[in-house]
Image: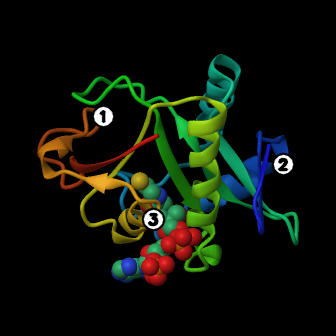
Amino acid sequence: MIETARLLLREWRSSDREPFARLNADPRVMEYFPARLSREQSDSLVDRVEAHFAKHGFGPFAAELRESGDFAGFVGLSIPPFEALFTPCVEIGWRLDAAYWGCGLATEGARAVMNYGFETLGLREIVSFTVPTNVRSRRVMEKLGMAHDAADDFDHPGIPDGHPLQRHVLYRKRA
Ligand SMILES: CC(C)(COP(=O)(O)OP(=O)(O)OC[C@H]1O[C@@H](n2cnc3c(N)ncnc32)[C@H](O)[C@@H]1OP(=O)(O)O)[C@@H](O)C(=O)NCCC(=O)NCCS
């Protein structure tokens, strides 16, 4: 569990599934993903997140607002399941309910997660990636001091050829 000024980053509870499904069905949140998720797909993502924690001891943490106890989304680390030039690697990622955007929460949580990755887990490098047009997410990466090299840009293996969201930018940060 990681605490920041406003967030509690913790393992998942069954009560997180309903608000997580709501944000995964929101077109604003899913603008840069191939599709919104049904309740079943959202639950299956939580199953994979829980399996990631069980296997690796870390994962995308559920992000809870300390003041209200509300579930706000996730911020955390994961090992991408696909092969690319930069894998194997550990990725930092975030997805928050749109109601909480624009207050610095993703950056606040991600800073703490990065420290945890480098200091507690002893990682040598953390990467992050998204589509070029996801300026909010790229801004978070930049605020974390991550660096983008156009030579690392790649086609996401999980997205079909020719799909407008196939091209991705990669950011890296070394310990
Ligand atoms: C990406 C996401 C987590 C950011 O959360 P957040 O808590 O709003 O992020 P922060 O407030 O820490 O930082 C957002 C930054 O983007 C900037 N920003 C927001 N909208 C912007 C826009 N349209 N153009 C340029 N910058 C923008 C903000 O101003 C802020 O930067 P600043 O602090 O320099 O002003 C949130 O938008 C989200 O959940 N998006 C949907 C899921 C997603 O795309 N996840 C990433 C997939 S790789």
In the figure, is residue 48 to the left or right of 62? Answer: left
Residue 138: in sight, yes or no?
Answer: yes
User: Amino acid under label 2?
Assistant: Ser
Mark 3 and mark 1 in contact? Answer it, CB < 8 Å: no
Residue 85 image label: none
Give how far apart the Cα atoms at labels 2 and 1 are.
29 Å
Which one is nearer the viewer's eye here, 96 or 3?
A: 3
Q: Residue furthest top?
A: 55
Q: Residues within 10 Å of mark 1 (few under 14, many from 20)?
A: few
The residue to which callout 1 is attached is 158
Which one is nearer the viewer's eye here, 30 or 109?
A: 109
The residue to which callout 3 is attached is 140
Q: Residues within 10 Å of mark 3 (few under 14, many from 20)?
A: many
Q: Position of residue 40 (x, y in %)?
A: 61, 40
Q: Position of residue 67 (x, y in %)?
A: 87, 72
Q: Quadrant of the N terminus?
A: top right
Where 89 falls versus 113 (above or below)?
A: above
Q: Does label 2 or label 1 sit earlier along the sequence?
A: 2
User: Amino acid under label 1?
Assistant: Gly
Residue 15 image label: 2
Q: Does label 2 or label 3 sit earlier along the sequence?
A: 2
Does the numbered disc 3 mark a residue whose Cβ is under 8 Å from ligand 1?
Answer: yes
Secondary element under disc 3, as helix, strand or loop, is helix
The answer to which image quadrant residue 174 occupies is top left
